[in-house]
Amino acid sequence: FTRRLNLNKRLSSMMYTHFIFMCDTCFQI
């Protein structure tokens, strides 16, 4: 369970950074 939660946490973190990156590129253009 902890392992699964950790994986989920990592995935959400990745999605968050990806979202920020996309927003950054959007604002730059």
Image: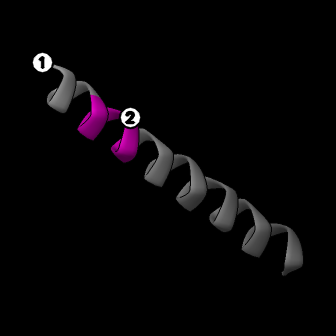
Percent position of residue 11, x then y? 35, 45
- Residue under label 1, please give it: 1
Residue situated in front as seen by the camera: 11 or 28: 11
Q: Residues within 10 Å of mark 1 (few under 14, many from 20)?
A: few
Q: Residue furthest right?
A: 28
Q: If you read the primary sequence from the N terminus, does the residue marked by circle 1 or circle 2 appear first?
A: 1
Q: Residues within 10 Å of mark 2 (few under 14, many from 20)?
A: few
Q: Amino acid at mark 1?
A: Phe
Q: Please tell me which residue is depicted at 37% across the width and 45% down the height of the picture.
A: 10
Image quadrant of residue 29? bottom right
In the rendered image, which quarter contains the N terminus? top left
Residue situated in front as seen by the camera: 17 or 26: 17
Magenta segment, prevailing SS (helix, strand or loop): helix
Which dot, 1 or 2, sits closer to the camera? 1
Image quadrant of residue 2? top left
The question of residue 26 being in magenta is answered with no
Specify start and end residues of the magenta stretch as a single range: 6-11
- Residue under label 2, please give it: 9
Instruction: Determine whether the residue tagged by mark 1 lies in a helix, strand or loop.
Output: loop
On screen, residue 3 versus residue 20, left or right, reads left
Image quadrant of residue 23? bottom right
On screen, residue 17 versus residue 29, left or right, reads left
Instruction: Determine whether the residue tagged by mark 2 lies in a helix, strand or loop.
Output: helix
On screen, residue 16 versus residue 27, left or right, reads left
**Relative vertical location of residue 12 with respect to residue 19 in this rendering, above or below:** above
Percent position of residue 12, x then y? 42, 40
On screen, residue 1 versus residue 29, left or right, reads left
